[in-house]
Image (cartoon, rainbow, N blue to C red):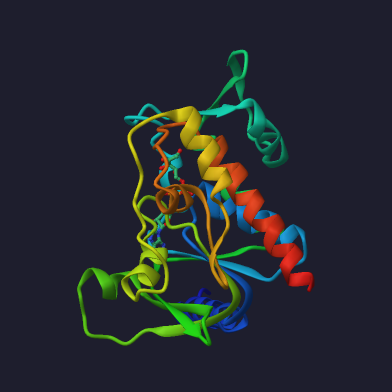
Amino acid sequence: MLKDVVISRAIIETYFRELLEHLNLDVAIVGAGPSGMVAAYYLVKGGAKVAIFEKKLSTGGGIWGGAMGFNKIVVEEEAKEILDEFEVRYDEFERGYYVADAIEAATTIASKTVKAGVKIFNMIEVEDLVIKKNRVAGIVINWTPVKMTSLHVDPLTVEAKFVIDSAGHGAQITQLLEKRGLIERVPGEGAMWAEMGEKLTVEHTKEVYPGLYVTGMAANAVAGAPRMGPIFGGMFLSGRKAALEILEKLKK
Ligand code: 48F
């Protein structure tokens, strides 16, 4: 006979055990879009303790809709190996342009990331950063429903050696530093130019303040680089670049 209360206990006990286990991290990642998930995957593969905090119900960020809801994504030559690593299938459309199914990409990347050992907490919004002695030292989290209803409920804190702003367009997490005068202005993304946008996104994937990295469209916004639309190689390469740099720093 199924006991309703055992179902409740199973969920509550396992969820809160995992939340407790992830209050001290090597890397806290804000946002489960393509750049955040790829960063998390390579970080855990390198031995780091990582969790992603995602404000929505679903992982995948901007992957799902492809472009205009036509659910295909395009990836360029340089990033094809990341599709291979995640075992996302693709077709060559023209030389150097690979097309993958957006649903397969979103689900497969999430599945591989979780199975590699990344804990993803969805429905949790990062509302602020912990900053101590001129270094980002963690994140401030709250339930998404609390944020949506603007209830006056205080948040909780997660400690991390590094935080990655993978929160996408606008670099909202990095903007928290701008608002406090700790970094220069975040210019936001420029007009569409795929080639330059992809290149500059990867180039500007870096530690923008001690303890805080930016990836994907957050890196693009911090650089004031052109937007690039539905091509995703720059997002994947940016996530991997941040992971590999942070792994080096964690060794020190
Ligand atoms: O926007 P998103 O997919 O970011 P990305 O990794 O990739 C961008 C591309 O999808 C695409 C593009 C280039 O091809 O233009 O848009 O840079 O994913 C960002 C994720 O972060 C979540 C948000 O719901 C999304 O899933 N997010 C945003 N702010 C917060 C957050 C926050 N404060 N706390 C938690 N999650």
- Residue 26's x, y, as percent? 66, 74
Can residue 3 be seen by looking at this rendering?
Answer: no
In the image shown, does 139 or 122 lie closer to the viewer?
139
Which quadrant of the structure image shows residue 179?
bottom left
- Residue 222's x, y, as percent? 43, 54
- Residue 5's x, y, as percent? 46, 82
Task: In the rendered view, tell whether residue 222 sits above or below residue 232.
Answer: below
Q: Spot the residue most to the front.
A: 184
Task: In the rendered view, tell whether residue 141 sits above or below residue 221.
Answer: below
- Residue 122's x, y, as percent? 45, 64
In the image shown, does 122 or 140 lie closer to the viewer?
140
Q: Is residue 164 left or right of residue 150?
A: right
Can residue 46 be seen by looking at this rendering?
Answer: yes
Residue beneath the point at 57% across and 44% down: 202
- Image quadrant occupied by the C terminus: bottom right
Residue beneath the point at 71% across and 56% down: 244
Which quadrant of the structure image shows residue 98?
top right
